Amino acid sequence: MTIGEICNREVVVVTRAATVAEAARLMRQHHVGDVVVVMEEGGLRTPVGILTDRDIVVDAIAVGLDPASLKVGEIMTPDLATVREDAGVFEAIRYMRDRGVRRMPVVDTGGDLIGILALDDLLELLAEELGALTRLIARERNKEAKLRP
């Protein structure tokens, strides 16, 4: 299974020029904890940063900056970790762990934004797979009991 198959393709995006207050409103409106900062050119959206609810609290609110006048580009995380849509699940998990991130934009081969992968998505997928394995164990026991009473 590839990341492109499990990522969320409904990504909330802003540009560097948006205010932090605008980004926060978008997060609230869409019930998400981050916005991907993109550069839009020729119909393509290239991720250039990410802004999380934590960034807003720690880098703006806690130090007394005005979110209405502060630009996203001033506090976004610019050293962006992205993952290609054709990457495998465990490759993405390893990359997230190595980079210390909980969310990663998913890009196509040209670097265009196609989705976002969150730790929550991976936990849900892994929980489903573990559930399938436990059902397999129970089925095996039942089969054994029927074959060898």
Image (cartoon, helix red, strand yellow):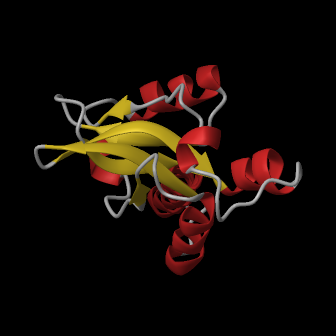
| 132 is higher (above) or lower (below) than 21 | above
| Nearest to the observer: residue 87 or residue 140 | 87
Examine the rendering and report whether any part of residue 115 can be seen: yes
Q: Residue at x 74, y 52 (%)?
A: 54
Give coordinates of residue 133: x percent, y percent.
52, 50
Q: Is residue 91 above or below residue 103?
A: above
Residue 134 location, quadrant:
bottom right
Outermost residue to the front: 69
> What quarter of the picture does the N terminus occupy?
top left
Is residue 129 positioned above or below 139 on the image? Answer: above
Which image quadrant: the C terminus? bottom right
Judging depth in this view, the residue of 99 and 76 nearest the camera is 76
Judge from the rendering whether residue 23 lies leftward or rightward of residue 36; answer left or right.
right
Instruction: Residue 61: give x, y in percent of width and height.
Output: 82, 57
Residue reaching furthest top?
98
Q: Picture coordinates of residue 16 (x, y %)?
A: 46, 46
Residue 2 on image: x %, y %: 30, 39
Q: Nearest the camera: 100 or 63?
A: 63
Image-quadrant location for residue 4 = top left
Q: Residue at x 23, y 39 (%)?
A: 112
Q: Residue at x 48, y 38 (%)?
A: 49
Residue farthest to the bottom, as pictured: 29
